[in-house]
Amino acid sequence: MKKKVNPNRMMLLRLKRRLELAQRGHKLLKNKQEKLMQNFFALVRETTLLRETVEQEFLEISMSYLRGRLMTDRQALQDALELTTSGGELIVAKRFEMSISIPEFSFRLERNDPAYQLGATSPELDRAFEKLMEHFPALMDLVGKENALFKMAEELEKTRRRVNALEYVLIPDLEGSIRTIESKLSEAERSSQTRLMKIKDMVQARGARD
């Protein structure tokens, strides 16, 4: 339902300024939307490659662990799992991209020698623990990139809704209101000219009689 407006020149000027502002905002949002789409799909490709690498690495870690578990005494395995601890520091940094706050995660691990007896465990188990420490930072990097994807997707959806609201609602409504006012002002101007011409004819007729 269109909002009723007063058909005067002041309102016409105001609506034209609003239309100009809406069109400028629409153009800026379209540019932002296109740039976001480019960055989003570039990050999708990057994240997909990283995920494949991380999944392959952790599959190898799991296989090493399973082989090591099969070749290690149950008590020795339990001791190794209980003693294999390593402290670390989770670092969260933020970067801004297209007005989006994106957290980036990194993890610093303390590299300690195994606290369990190496002779009591399988080399495969030792290899699994070593690979886990080695590839854990890549897992944190993947977490950060996937988090960035979710945030960019949310921003894309918000930008798309704003673009559509301007393109299909606000701008057409403003253009329709402007056309209506211009039509009514033109009609009023024609009526005024018609009245003036009638008055002029009446004055000329009276002057001819006199």
Image (cartoon, rainbow, N blue to C red):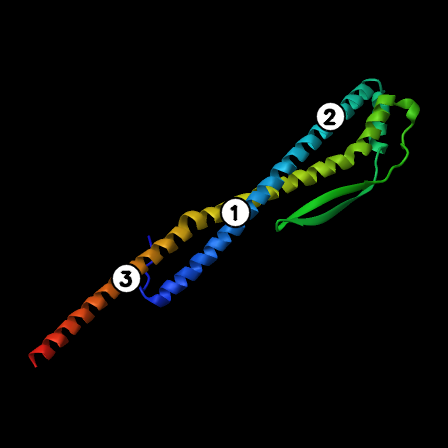
Disc 1 to disc 2, C-alpha distance: 39 Å
| Residue at horizontal 73 percent and vertical 25 percent from the top | 56
| Residue kind at label 2, given as amino acid type | Gln
Q: Mark 1 = which residue?
A: 30
Q: Residues within 10 Å of mark 1 (few under 14, many from 20)?
A: some
Q: Residue 136 in the image: x percent, y percent?
A: 77, 35
Question: Residue lying furthest front in this view?
Answer: 208
Sequence order check, earlier mark of 2 and 3: 2
Residue 58: mark in rendering? none
Q: Residue 134 in the image: x percent, y percent?
A: 82, 33
Question: Residue lying furthest left in this view?
Answer: 209
Residue 146 figure quarter: top right
Mark 2 and mark 3 residues within 8 Å of each other at the beta carbon:
no
Query: Left or right: 112 with respect to 4?
Result: right
| Residue kind at label 1, given as amino acid type | Lys
Q: Mark 3 = which residue?
A: 186
Disc 1 to disc 3, C-alpha distance: 35 Å
Quick check: 106 above or below 115?
below
Sequence order check, earlier mark of 1 and 2: 1
| Residue at horizontal 22 percent and vertical 67 percent from the top | 193
Quick check: 75 above or below 113?
above
Question: Residue lying furthest bottom in this view?
Answer: 210
Q: Mark 2 = which residue?
A: 56
Quick check: 130 above or below 99?
above
Q: Residues within 10 Å of mark 2 (few under 14, many from 20)?
A: few
Of residue 160 and residue 207, the one placed in the foreground of this image is 207
Q: Residue 2 in the image: x percent, y percent?
A: 33, 54
Query: Left or right: 180 with respect to 148?
Result: left
Disc 2 to disc 3, C-alpha distance: 73 Å
SS for dot 3: helix
